Amino acid sequence: MEKIAELLDCPVCLDRFKQPKVLPCQHSYCLRPCLQNLVQDNSIRCPECRACHNLPRNGIEGLPINVMAVRLIDQQKPRRQCKECDVGDGDVDKCNHCDESLCRKCIADHTRGLQQDLRHSLIQVRRLVTKLAESDYDLRERAKKLEENGRNMKREISQSIERFILELQSRKKALFKDVDALVTMETGSLQREQGELKVEMAALTTHCQIATELCERTLDMSNPEIQQFQSEILCLTQRGRDHVQSDGIPSDKVRQSIKLTNDDENLVLYAISNFGTVSAYGAGEVPEGANGWASELQSAEDSRATEVLRRYRNKGKVKTYFGTTGNGLGQMRSPHGIYATTADDIVVADCYNHRLQIFDAIGQANGVIGSEGKSEGQFDGVGDVCVTSHGKIIASDFNNHRIQIFDEHGRFVRTFGSNGSGNGQFISPFGVATDDKGMIYVCDYGNKRVQVFSANGQFIRKFGSEENRLNKPTYLSVTSHGRVIVGDDRNNRLQVFDEYGRHLFQFGTDGTNDSQFDNPAGIATDHHGNIIVADRHNHRVQVFMSDGTFVSSFGSDGSEPGQMTWPQGVCLLSDGDIAVSDSGNHRVQIF
């Protein structure tokens, strides 16, 4: 049955056939948007066999319907049966209230029961309103007490800080006195040294004059007086040397500078910057070492995380959008993956134009990488794109079953992968991502797994195929903490793994409510681990916390600004804006 189910999937949109049409080459595709996007000049090229066919006079509408696929899809639809009795399809309808399948008779009984339940619920609601009014009064009183407590705590903090300031000022005066005392003492020593130097200078000067006069006469060196005078000169010279070093700088006996020794300065500064902890506690709780402070002050990191969540909840208004349908510069045909560089350049996987396009933050097209083909640097359908910390551009070439790498200037570097199921081989690779170690993660869509490679394309590991855990993974993202978030397309959920492929948890179910998906697509994560997901067939973007808790969603089906049709890729800009590739409208929107 699984093989039959796969035959009912469109090879282009990778989803169950919708109005399947058959080409002359016997390959089938959805009428819209799949075949519609492949039409060029009243002809169409088959994405699988590459055969080119002329269209009938009335276009793709005139292509024959794949009747067998339509019948198989109809047969797979579940048979409706009354939940309460055994009445079959013909007389069974759905309850408008709870969506249960019931026959006409059971619906009447069911409706009366719902009315009775509603009356009981109304009584409970009225009681609840009274209790809520009492709680509202209590909360107002508690808010007043909390404000008064906050004012008291501010006064206490001010008094504590003032005490520290007074102590620091007192310490400043004491240190100044110590400096003055040392300066006076060392100045006295310098003056005494100066006096001794003057005495020695006078003695040396006198002896120099006498020696000069003796040198002008004929001396009898055997005269004892001459010998004694020579000895006195030598003695005075040695004493002068004791006072002065050979280079003329006063000797080390004289202290010329004063130094403040403060080995604990960093510890003191740290203690000041981290002084005090302010926390909130419930009634009757006594915080240890709280000094009577009882209001909560969140850390800076928590404050930033809270602000980020607040901004996500306010998303939904489009700031700008760019792109139209076509193959010219700045035009797109079904944009898929999208990635923002550190410079806020936006790289778009222009899927059916078989290329990458690079835009600046305001939507100005700055360059194109690739063209249609099978050679190096060419693509046959571009699924996703990411950029490494070194500027390398990595793109999935899904119909050529390979990954291509380009440098920051768009020049081809290398390719890896081939068609197959072995390690390092792919069947229609789709999502790509990289981590801070340079590892490359690839959603191997057809093989229902994720493969991990080194920066140069060497196979490292694979995960997700064990116990059929992943069913057609499309996109993925790697958080700054090494978690790998994978979009499990056919299971309509996100699965979270560690960097080694060990399963951590999953969230999401099939549906249209909050935290439910209809084919999850592009995934982005921020520095706090929050997860942004393109919910493709629900035509919206959903935001979750790192543990899978729902935060917000925005977007609806349509072509007006702020609306979207089949969103594929998402990415985050440096200012927190979210860029979305609006695949069905052939444009990128920034929220």
Image (cartoon, rainbow, N blue to C red):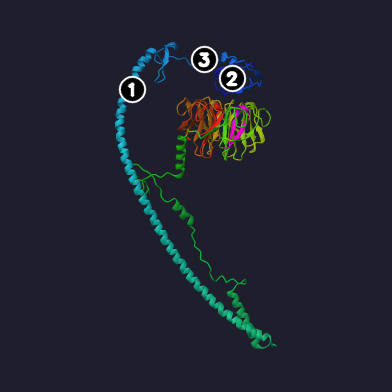
Q: Residue 514: x percent and y percent?
A: 45, 28
- Gap in angstroms between the C-alphas marked 1 and 3: 37 Å
Residue 273: x and y, percent? 45, 51
The amino acid pointed to by label 1 is Leu
Q: Is residue 457 visible?
A: no
Using the numbered discs, state the Cα–Cα distance from disc 3 to disc 2 in whole angstroms: 17 Å
Q: Position of residue 472 (x, y in %)?
A: 56, 26
Residue designated by label 3: 74
Tell me the mark number nearer the camera, choosing from 3 and 2.
Answer: 2
Question: Which residue corresponds to the image point at 32% horizontal and 43% vertical from the top-left?
Answer: 144
The residue type indicated by label 2 comes to Tyr
Residue linked to disc 2: 29
Quick one: 358 or 379, which is closer to the camera?
Answer: 358
| Residue 334 appearing in the image | yes
Instruction: State the extent of the magenta-drawn residues as a range.
Output: 346-360
Asked if 577 appears above or below 472 in the picture, the reply is below
**Are there few (<14), some (14-19), or many (20+) residues within 10 Å of tag 2?**
many
Q: Nearer the viewer, residue 83 or 309?
A: 309
Give the class, few, some or many, for how many residues have Cα within 10 Å of label 3's Cα (few <14, many ≥20). few
Mark 1 nearby-residue class (10 Å; few <14, some 14–19, many ≥20) = few
- At label 3, the amino acid type is Asp
- Residue farthest right in this picture: 218
The label shown at residue 118 is 1
